[in-house]
Amino acid sequence: MILGISGSPRRMATEHILGEALKMLEERGLETVQFSVRGKQISPCRHCDYCLKNKECFIKDDMYQLYPLFREASGLVMATPVYNGGVSAQIKILMDRTRALLAADTQILWAKPGMAIAVGGDRMGGQELAVQQIHTFYILNGMIPVSGGFFGANLGATFWSRDSLEGAMDDEEGFRSLRKTVKRFSQTVELVKRMNEPDR
């Protein structure tokens, strides 16, 4: 199962573009689940270290809907709106709150492929910086960050929304970067799956 996470508090461009990405993955034969932070109560990490001793998070909120999905997923797709040249506060909170998962099992995300989508209101609003933040999270947790490659999707999928869903849907270059990234991501998921087969 591929877990897609929308880090936007609104039902707008980011959530819609993530849905388009998951449809593309389903067309390639992958099962997907979409999770949105919209309407969820997810508090920031308090760095209380409760999870280090008890192997679970002290804060009992909607993050507990996401924890089992992280465990089950064979790959992650994180999508964020661009705020102040980086990821949204909501997606950063999710990253920080995975500490409880890692306290219970440091290998929980190991070798899982991950791709990133960033949607910005400005043409050069920090989309690639936001993608790099997500990739840093992947690298820190032993995941495999996947880009779309040279000539259009160097780090991942990036969209210029002009602050509207319609703007994002009209971004042909954004969709080209998405298709390229989805293709390489799905190939990486299948490669990791084959490598983990028992007879190998």
Image: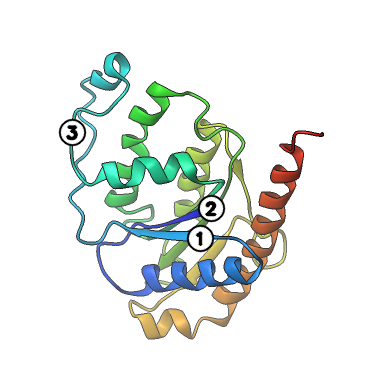
Q: CA distance from mark 1 to mark 2?
A: 5 Å
Q: In the rendered image of this protein, does residue 100 appear above or below residue 70?
A: above
| Label 3: which secondary element | loop
Would you say 144 lies left or right of 4 here?
A: right
Q: In the rendered image of this protein, does residue 144 appear above or below residue 49?
A: below
Q: Please give the residue where the numbered disc 2 appears in the rendered image.
A: 1
Which quarter shows the C terminus? Answer: top right
Q: Please give the residue where the numbered disc 1 appears in the rendered image.
A: 32
Q: Is residue 123 visible?
A: no
Number of labelled discs? 3
Q: Picture coordinates of residue 71 (x, y %)?
A: 45, 39
Q: Picture coordinates of residue 37 (x, y %)?
A: 28, 56
| Label 2: which secondary element | loop
Give the mark nearer the N terminus: 1 vs 3: 1
Q: Nearer the viewer, mark 1 or mark 3?
A: 1
Give the mark nearer the N terminus: 3 vs 2: 2
Q: CA distance from mark 1 to mark 3?
A: 27 Å
Circle 1/circle 2 CB separation < 8 Å:
yes
Name the residue: 72% across, 56% down. 187
Q: Which mark is on residue 184? A: none
Q: Which mark is on residue 59? A: 3
Give the mark nearer the N terminus: 1 vs 2: 2
Task: Point out the residue furthest to the top here.
Answer: 53
Task: Point out the residue furthest to the front here.
Answer: 199
Name the residue: 48% across, 23% down. 106
Q: Nearer the viewer, residue 138 or 199?
A: 199
Q: Picture coordinates of residue 188 (x, y %)?
A: 70, 50
Please state which amino acid type lies under the numbered disc 3.
Ile
